[in-house]
Image (cartoon, rainbow, N blue to C red):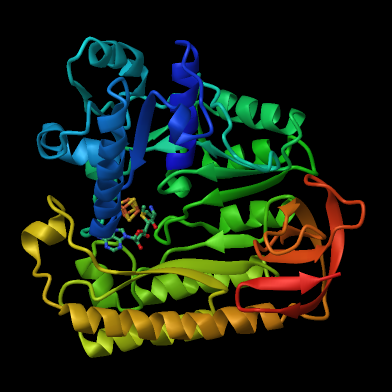
Amino acid sequence: MNVVDSEVVAAILQQHQYRVCDSLEEADLVLVNTCSIRDNAEQKVRSRIREFGRLKEKNHSFSVGVIGCMAERLKEKLLEEENTVDLVVGPDAYRDLPALLQEVESGQKGINTILSLEETYGDIRPVRMDQNHVTSFVAIMRGCNNFCAYCVVPGTRGRERSRDPETIVGEATELFSRGYREVTLLGQNVNSYCWKEGGSLLKFEKLLERVAGIDPSFRVRFATSHPKDMSDDLLKVIARYPNLCRSIHLPVQSGSTSVLERMKRRYTREHYMDRISAIRKYLPEATISTDIIAGFCGETEEEHQQTLSLMEWAGYDFAYMFKYSERPDTFAAEQLEDDVSEAVKSRRLSEIIELQNRLSLESKKRDVGLTFEVLVEGTSKKSSQQLYGRTSQNKVVVFPKKDLKPGDYTEVFITDCTSATLIGS
Ligand code: SAM
Ligand code: SF4
């Protein structure tokens, strides 16, 4: 989401004679697009800002802006605490950047952190900053209404709003005509995408069909699905279109119903398992990935064991795994006690990661001896004679270059694997 937002910001500033440059030495302005999801994300941003402070000492016309969730969360406090920072702009105020930059040029500090109920940047065509020109992202909605107990997103990104489907399909069509072959549709809970059209409602399933209909060689992914809202109808639509990718990201957070209740996730372990079974039924070839939080408030050893047993049952192909990090102004920070010690959180997270490493390796091993259609994305980091690409299942494959180039599709026979990569010919 921040990648897309940076591309939106570049588009807004380009209309005002700014351009994106490749090196810090060339830059007159640095905008740090920030994440507040965990405390360590914010700490990294702060140390980065201090690095820019040293550059500022050498070049007095150099300005530093903080944009995104951390700007929204900390507001004026950021200007007070980090004197390198000239500009603080929240995720819904990017159209105001040119005016704020004029204030900065005249020696003042600029700030706008007003959240909007409508802003979707729907009419802005992002300036693409990806390296491969094959895969890209399109935001279909902004904000979130779910208020999971641990999460800052509803506070930093505001209420959920969906973007006009015409602008989404238009942007995706343009990407395809420029040679892109894969798009990922983004929202915090894509299953609740909803647009009023005439007297009827256009839901996510319909939007997905429209984007999939652009061209059969245009792959479509999406993130993120919320287990409480993911329907059989959606899975049936995916099954009908071969270019809707066979990989579903379904964050579980915890395998214990009582923890899920404290997290305010609004589903149970059983409901989640039912959704996994539905994916296996309608999309038997799909991979499933997830997000897991270790050591949420009050998590007992037994509740932790339930997360491990659910992981084993689901056989996740991939997972993002985190230690719980208390975030100010969330329900959990205000009403629950962050009472799992750092040592226990770390141990539980290690157990989760260790199990996932095994599951990831098993998932890759199952592909050895099979052939997959791979979309070529670029040259492998390790060898200029090797390319890398992805299967529909979102697994990375490395294979010999021959006369292939990024954007091509090729059939790859899988000969070997590591826990992260498939190797093929
Ligand atoms: N909207 C998506 C969902 O509900 O699954 C994900 C949004 S969040 C940006 C990405 C992931 O960060 C979450 O799925 C969760 O696992 C993790 N996360 C969010 N808040 C966290 C916190 N306070 N501590 C640790 N991990 C957190
Ligand atoms: Fe955060 Fe929950 Fe919204 Fe995801 S659904 S962004 S975890 S509040």
Farthest residue to the front: give it.
58
Q: Quadrant of residue 261?
A: bottom left
The number of callouts visible is 0
Q: Classify residue 374 as left or right of residue 184.
A: right
Which residue shows up at 31% across the image and 20% down it?
Answer: 61
In the picture, which quadrant includes the N terminus? top left
Residue in the foreground of this view, choosing between 198 and 75 = 75
Q: In which of the image's four quarters is ligand 1 placed?
A: bottom left
- Does residue 163 show up? no
Q: Is residue 251 above or below residue 221?
A: below
- Does residue 343 show up? yes
Residue 117, percent across and down?
29, 27
Residue 345, percent across and down?
24, 79
Residue 390, percent across and down?
71, 59
Which residue shows up at 75% across the image and 65% down it?
Answer: 398
Residue in the foreground of this view, choosing between 97 and 28 = 28
Q: Quadrant of residue 349?
A: bottom left
Q: Is residue 279 above or below residue 106?
A: below
Residue in the foreground of this view, choosing between 327 and 166 = 327
Residue in the foreground of this view, choosing between 282 and 13 = 13
